[in-house]
Image: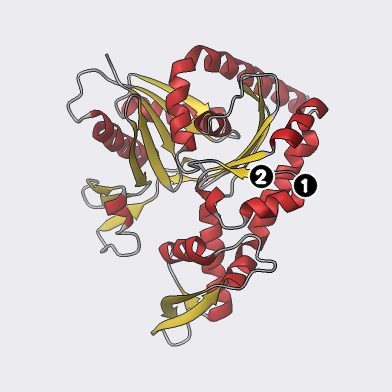
Amino acid sequence: MSTDIGIDLGTANVIVFVKGKGIVLREPSVVAIDKTSGKVIAVGAKARRMLGRTPGNIVAIRPLRNGVIADYDVTEKMLRYFIEKANGRKFLFKPRVMVCIPSGVTGVEERAVKQAAIQAGARQAHVIEEPLAAALGAGLDISEPGGTMVVDIGGGTTDVAVLSLGGIVISRSLRLGGDKFDEAIVKYIRREFNLAIGERTGEEIKMEIANACPNGSAPMGMQVRGRDLVDGLPKQITVTSHHVYEAIRENLTLVVDTVKEVLEETPPELAADIVDKGIVLTGGGALLHGLDKLLAGETGLNVFLAEDPLSCVAMGTGRALTMLNVLNAQAKRRMIRKALRHKITAG
């Protein structure tokens, strides 16, 4: 009689899926706290509006960095808020919760996620790797003995994986995502225009005019306001899509190199399947304009954007709760592989 809840615990956003209802929450991973009393002032969208605008006694915190928990206590409070909001504050039975994690997390980071979910009110807490959840949420059939490649670009991490027979054959997790693109834009404008802007403005620039493959396209412009670093006064400048491309080009190269690295290590039979099926892009970072064209040009493969890339991981976590036996067996195999790799490295 308890509720099943799937949570995409992202660096930038938390998306909550409830069995039988679908996506019920989609809010930023931000918590505003009173430093004096330790009391939570706001969570989610309300807290995000406070970023960079709080008085001295209130601090707006993003408790997750690079896809993992950076502040355990704040993450627990945030999870409790979202679970209560999704399940009802006075729920009779504690819910089963499935939380996604990047494919490259350590055992300590994985246990921290499970423990935070239990402390936040879950009856059972399970974890699933993001590429697997993304594939399930995108509606891909990964149960057959055929290769499927997923590139999931979130706020803090990029996960690239080849899947077959319901599990991950090979994967790479890059601690780089939408947040790093925002930071790169902020640093570029500071360096080239002597203008200080905030993270929110950097994200708005990325969403409005960023283009991962600008060749042959007319540049788009955007008015950007900030503080002049020379005289300290407010100032407005015009930034073009070519400026933004220069800012994020290095990060784009890292993503492309990671995809190529996974392809190079993919077994030949699965590589042949990927030639037929192509690569599927999921996650909020997949919405970066021109990214599919960039990857297609660099790999020579067809690249497709999932139908709802932002919600794929959350929907996949909800679907995964119906196949726990299979996932638990895969988790055991994953622990064995990690132990063997550690033994080989130590030896």
User: Could you tell me which secondary element the residue under label 2 belongs to?
Assistant: strand
The alpha-carbon separation of the residues under discs 2 and 1 comes to: 9 Å
Q: Position of residue 170 (x, y in %)?
A: 70, 30
Residue type highlighted by circle 1: Gly
- Which residue appears farthest toward the right when viewing the image? 268
Left or right of residue 205: residue 46: left
Q: Residues within 10 Å of mark 1 (few under 14, many from 20)?
A: few
Residue type highlighted by circle 2: Val
- Residue 245 appears in the picture as rendered: yes
Which residue is tagged 1? 300
Which residue is tagged 2? 303
Determine which quarter of the picture holds residue 143.
Answer: top right
Q: Say which of 13 and 53 sits in front.
A: 13
Residue depicted at 48% across the width and 36% down the height: 312
Q: Say which of 71 and 120 sits in front.
A: 120
Determine which quarter of the picture holds residue 180.
Answer: bottom right
Left or right of residue 233: residue 93: left
- Residue 266 appears in the picture as rendered: no
Left or right of residue 11: residue 148: right
